[in-house]
Image (tube, rainbow, N blue to C red):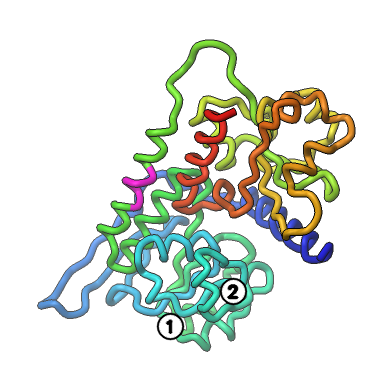
Amino acid sequence: MKSRKCTSLLLTLAFMLALTACTAKVNESPSSSSAPTDGAARTVTFTDMTGRTITLEDEAERIVALTAADCEILYALGASDKLVGRGEYCDYPAEVLNIPSVQSGSETNIEQIIALKPDVLVMGTIDQTEEQVASLEAAGIKVVVSDADDIEGVYTAVNMLGTLTGNTEEAASVIDSMKSTFAQVSSNDTTGDKKTVYFEVSPLQYGLWTAGSDTFMDEIATMLGLENVFSDISGWGEISEEQVLSRNPDYIVTISMYFGEGPTPEEEIMSRAGWENVEAVKTGAILNLANNEISRPAPRLAEGAKLMYDFINNN
């Protein structure tokens, strides 16, 4: 069990660090066009999130998505029936586990992907190489890059995948729902001192890591009128106990998984020696969001924001 916990945490950290390496950031919706012909096939053209022009003879019918976020988006769009393969770390919603998996990330397996006979492969910018892209396209598979690194980027990805699958109305609905939730939880209070929050993305026993600026967590904290105590760090960073104690956060949000044995992540934080004077520990203001609600560039970021909003308004 300890090995399982460690593996999960290492995968979480690997994902966080990989997000930092993403360089493409697109804040506008991808341009798209289509030309229907007598109800038959239609050409679909749009720009992916690295600026590549993608042209399909028709809407995609067989898709392999390598990233967990893109799998989530396809399900949110109601396009899961077009998903014939997934990256091995795609885990939400639960039914995605019934989709055949392929090796992804640095272990991307081209042969596994080709064997699934997709029209399109959706992937991120991490680990995949130009040679791999060339091999896939030589096999007749269109490669589409999805690379959201902020909330606006999520909207762009949703629009792009909506265009890819012919689910443009559903894409608009998903985005409207996210914006509506964000508007509900956004704080317009500029008076008084801001409450502070510390995001713990790796617990003490594995070395503390946190979310700084340029992360979804920081973006949501700002939205809620909170100050991220590590906003001076860019992206995801390793920190020390002493730094957390000196910054004395009012709230702590952890994303550690719990496997049903031993203390919960909240209990573990509450019991740490020397942390008893941290404001969040004194008041018990510790929230565990262990299901990637605030760490994955997908529609559930809105759910994570609402969970944080409810938590801070009850503590």
Q: Quarter of the image holding residue 258?
A: bottom right
**Label 1 vs label 2, nearer the camera:** 1
Residue 140 disc label: 1
Characterize the local packing of mark 2: few (<14), some (14-19) or many (20 or more) Cα atoms within 10 angstroms.
few
Quarter assignment of residue 257: bottom right
Q: Is 184 colored magenta in this rendering?
A: no
Residue 270, percent from left and from top = 78, 36
| Element assignment for label 1 | loop
The quadrant of the image that shows the N terminus is bottom right
Q: Circle 2 sits on which residue?
A: 131
Horizontal side of 26 relative to 46 (left or right) equals: right
Of residue 197 and residue 234, the one placed in the foreground of this image is 197
Number of residue marks: 2
User: Above or below — where is 209 with respect to 183?
Assistant: below
**Amino acid, disc 1:** Gly
- Across and down, in percent, residue 35 comes to 18, 68
Residue at horizontal 44 percent and vertical 30 percent from the top = 186
Coordinates of residue 234 in the picture (x, y in percent): 66, 36
Q: Label 1 vs label 2: CA separation?
A: 15 Å
Q: Which residues are magenta?
A: 174-178
Instruction: Looking at this view, name the residue that lies furthest to the left.
Output: 38
Q: Quadrant of the C terminus?
A: top right
- Are circles 1 and 2 on residues that touch, CB within 8 Å? no
